[in-house]
Image (cartoon, grey):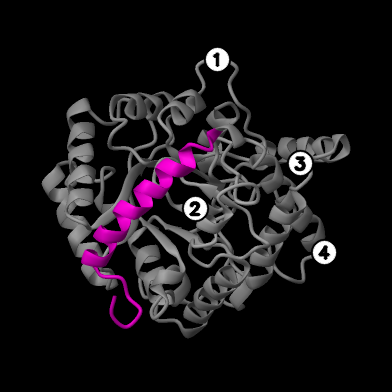
Amino acid sequence: MADGRMTRRDFLQTSASAAAAGGLAMGMGALGPNVAKAAGASDVAKTRSYNPGMEYRRLGKTGLWVSAVCMGGHWKRIDKAVGHTGKGIFGGDFNDPDFQKNRHDVVSKCIEVGINHIDACTIEEVRAYSKALQGRREAMFLGCSWYQNELRNKNFRTAESLLGMLDKGMKESGLEYVDLWRITMHERSGQHTEAEVREMMKALETAKKQGKARFVGFSSHDRPHIKWMIETFPAVVDAVVTPYTADSKVLPKDSLFDAVKKEKVGMFGIKPFGGTSLFKGDSSPTSPEAEADDRRARLAIRYILENPAVTAPIPGLISAHQVDNMALAVKERRQELSAEEKAELKAAGREMWARLPEDYQWLRDWEYV
């Protein structure tokens, strides 16, 4: 390790140790994923940005311990936090100083409270968070996808083209390696052929062998397709990134979680707040609904974490205050939701479904998982 940075050679050596530690952690399976407070605490305390006030969950069979709430890469409504909608925030140029300061400060707050994983799923997000982590790369696990040039793009459906994008994306972002390369797929079954899926799995497996990605997986919005891929390629898939909202429920039969648990796959849940549809306010700090929306956010996180098969929800966070609110949600979940809290969240969930914009109607398919 040089200048505090882990090189590809360093991580190849440490990944073997992480996998071995994961095997030991799996031996504590009867305790469920949340054993940081109960057993193996000394191992968990070695995770990145450990904070005793945060809860940590084992990311499937990887051996990594990630915070019970992680940070999603999206920055929806960030104009409410920085005070303007400049090109540097929503355009292709991310040199806006207010945007850069916001991302740096939010990442700093995450490190402070013990949130230790970022999921960056676009070219712009990978660049933004790589920059925000400069000089402190080892403080966070970084999951990456360059979705514009992955399987959703017809020109990137071979192992060769996908690996080429990985190389290009890492070089442009100044990354020696990624902790999780999770390729973004189309949302529906039938949009990819089996041959394309096999090419993707080949690329993931190769990246892992070459030391470019410590662990690998994919993102999809189609439950049957996800289940098939986990069951068909259990030796390849370490983690999946897929929706799980404040009102999602486990299917009583043929649930996706059957495969997730059987194959010990980590799961990051996107859209926990229904893409902001859970909230009444506009996410500005002066919103008259700010306090009530903070409470809704905490209730949603606590509810999601009651499902032990979900490693961590990954909400997008636009301010240090929102980070603190997520840390508070983890502390509050030491107790399960009361009957009154469940009723309150259920009513908020109905409002969330009713407020979904047209381009988010697909999320209704994730009411049952």
**Which label is found at residue 65?**
2
Which residue in the structure is indicated by mark 3?
Answer: 348
State the image coordinates of residue 181 (x, y, percent, origin top left). Answer: 31, 52
Q: Earlier in the sequence, mark 2 or mark 1?
A: 2
Q: Nearer the viewer, mark 3 or mark 4?
A: 3
Q: Give the distance between the C-alpha atoms of the residues marked 3 and 4, in whole angstroms.
A: 17 Å
Q: Earlier in the sequence, mark 3 or mark 4?
A: 4
The kind of secondary structure element at disc 4 is: loop
State the image coordinates of residue 220 (x, y, percent, origin top left). Answer: 39, 38
The reply, left or right, for residue 37 in relation to residue 191 is right
Which residue in the structure is indicated by mark 1?
Answer: 253
State the image coordinates of residue 64 (x, y, percent, origin top left). Answer: 44, 52
Q: Is residue 230 above or below residue 140?
A: above
Amino acid type shown at disc 1: Lys
Q: Nearer the viewer, mark 3 or mark 2?
A: 2
Which residue in the structure is indicated by mark 4?
Answer: 288
Q: Nearer the viewer, mark 1 or mark 4?
A: 1
